[in-house]
Image (cartoon, helix red, strand yellow):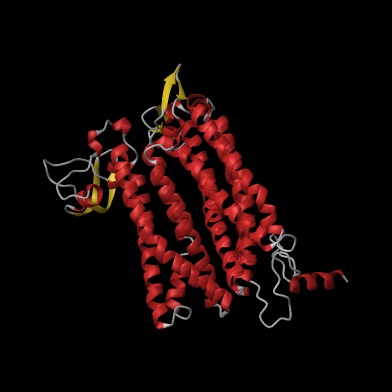
Amino acid sequence: MFGLEAIDLARIQFAFTVSFHILFPAITIGLASYLAVLEGLWLKTRDDTYRDLYHFWSKIFAVNFGMGVVSGLVMSYQFGTNWSRFSDFAGAVTGPLLTYEVLTAFFLEAGFLGVMLFGWNKVGRKLHFFSTVMVAIGTLISTFWILSSNSWMQTPQGFEIVDGRVIPVDWLAVVFNPSFPYRLAHMAVAAFVATAFFVGSSAAWHLLRGRDNPAIRRMLSMAMWMALIVAPVQAVIGDFHGLNTLKHQPAKIAAIEGHWENIGNEPTPLILFGWPDMKAEKTRFAVEIPYLGSLILTHSLDKQVPALKEFPPEDRPNSTIVFWSFRVMVGLGMLMIFTGLWSVWLRKRGTLYTSRPFLYLTLWMGPSGLIAILAGWFTTEIGRQPWVVYGLMRTADASSAHSFVQMSITLALFVVVYFSLFGVGLGYMMRLVRKGPVTNEGAETSHGGPGQKRTPARPLSAADDDHHSISLNKGN
């Protein structure tokens, strides 16, 4: 069917589950740190706006965290079910790294998550804040180990091959492989960027509907300050990451650039747009800027970038896909930087919260960080092909011996279950976002806080009091 084989379906299945899963940890990483900042600011200033925002976003964090855990478990099982040959070959490296993630990060998160979500009125302020910080640190530690494992598959080192299996001989070299620092920084900052625009979009949605209060304004303000800082930083990290990729995975860079061959000693142009044709071995309808490819990728005006024709056809990534996935990521990154700069201009004019064109842009930029993460992930993983462990094991040799029918059935089941289960979860999370933060302006209530009496926080409750009253009336 459609020229696909069982291994193609296995790859599609893994890509499908990864695409769902990666969205949840990205928001979890960003929201955990955001919650730590909110609680820290509340403890320092006693401004109730920070407290109200903490309770609001802790509910969304709880739902998101749960979906991330569930989707992550499914991915782990796929290593054994669909990619058993890979597990047999490289399990001595990837297995311990994923185990370290569970022992150091997941246990840390699980240990303090309950206190963070349900201990607001049951523990002291310092302990509750400490718990929130520990959960935030746990998400970053989890990112550390996951990216270390994946980066080793991109740039493997610190091992020997004995009897057809990878045996680690230097764990420091394994963990801190050549691409790991760049990919860790790139992913962590991407999570902060994605969360900033998620929060900013939520604030813009409420402001456009006339709900203007200090909590909503604080959401937008903090999100735009974050975007202004981290979006340009991400561009710089991306540049260093590109240089590292050029050194260790030149075929990936050639595919990203849609660059097929060098002419004499001419510097490499940058192809802004075009359509890489893998069969014809050329990029059709190319729009080029002379010298710019060499300048961006080698930081010089005379050095050339490796070309796809320098590699055997069987070793070339699919340029058609990674060419465009990379441009989607970069294009959204430029829009993020523009949004941050526009927010500064509006802030100086005093119209940050009232400029409808800006608010509409911020609203529509809400999913931009997550889309950019997916595009970057596709670029990284498809650009690594045809290798599952770069230079050591081909993807074609890594899969389990399943039939086309078996893979078709399981893929169909994954699609149905994922869209049903996580569709409900995402819908519930969006319902929480639409409800907005509950403030206590004008109410005669205690300011509350950890260790003090206050209406309990309900991290998983989206029902308001009106809905509750209606249900009671119907019951009567």
Number of marks in the rendered image:
0
The residue sitting at the top extreme is: 163
> At which x and y percent is residue 187?
45, 50
Q: Which residue is drawn at 37% across and 70% down?
A: 341
In this view of the protein, which residue sits in the foreground, 168 or 13? 168
Q: Can residue 159 be seen in this view?
A: yes
Q: Which of 395 and 215 is in front in this view?
A: 215
166 or 338, which lies in front?
166
The C terminus appears in which quarter of the rendering? bottom right
Furthest residue toward left: 264
Instruction: Tell me if residue 417 can be seen.
Output: no
Q: Residue 254 appears in which quarter of the rendering?
A: top left
Q: Is residue 147 left or right of residue 275?
A: right
Q: In this view, does 295 lie above or below 367?
A: above
Give the x, y percent position of residue 393: 41, 27
Residue furthest to the right in view is 476
Left-right relation of 394 to 280: right
Q: Residue at point 43% right, 31% down?
A: 395
Image x and y of residue 458, in percent: 71, 63
Please name whichever residue, 217 or 136, is drawn nearer the observer in this view of the structure.
136
125 above or below 106?
below
Q: Position of residue 428 (x, y in %)?
A: 64, 60
> In the visual, does 397 lie left or right of 418?
left
